[in-house]
């Protein structure tokens, strides 16, 4: 396997693990809020879930951008 594929699989595995831990840990959360998009609002979601998902998506996108840069070289 090439180095880029290993990096992609490792990042997917780590972020999937973070998401699983987030789902398990968020079950007893009490404080909930809605997220306002341009057109609609979401259902009430726990604040920790919103923060956790934004962290995970940023981590995934950041790792894919760095991997994309290595493909250009």
Image (tube, helix red, strand yellow):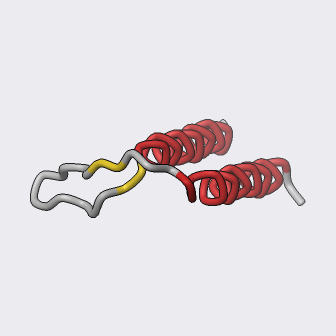
Measuring from the top left, give residue 13's x and y in whole percent. Answer: 76, 57
Give the residue drawn at x 18%, y 58%: 41
Q: Nearer the viewer, residue 9 or 17?
A: 17
In which quadrant is the N terminus drawn? bottom right
Residue 44, quarter of the rendered image: bottom left
| Residue lying farthest to the right in this orientation | 1
Report the front residue among 24 and 52. Answer: 24
Q: Residue at x 62, y 36 (%)?
A: 66
Residue 26 drawn at (x, y percent) = 56, 53
Q: Give me the residue at 52% from left, 44% from top.
A: 52
Q: Residue 9 or 69: which is nearer the viewer?
A: 9
| Relative to 34, 54 lies left or right | right
User: Residue 70's quadrant in the figure?
Assistant: top right
Q: Position of residue 12 (x, y in %)?
A: 70, 56
Relative depth, front residue between 59 and 66: 59
Q: Residue at x 12, y 52 (%)?
A: 38
- Looking at the image, is 1 positioned above or below residue 70? below
């Amino acid at each position: 396997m090439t180095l880029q594929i290993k990096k992609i699989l490792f990042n997917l595995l780590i972020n999937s693990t973070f998401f699983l831990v987030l789902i398990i840990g968020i079950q007893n959360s009490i404080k909930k809020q809605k997220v306002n998009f341009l057109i609609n609002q979401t259902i009430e979601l726990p604040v920790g879930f919103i923060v956790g998902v934004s962290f995970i998506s940023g981590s995934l996108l950041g790792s894919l951008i760095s991997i994309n840069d290595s493909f250009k070289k």
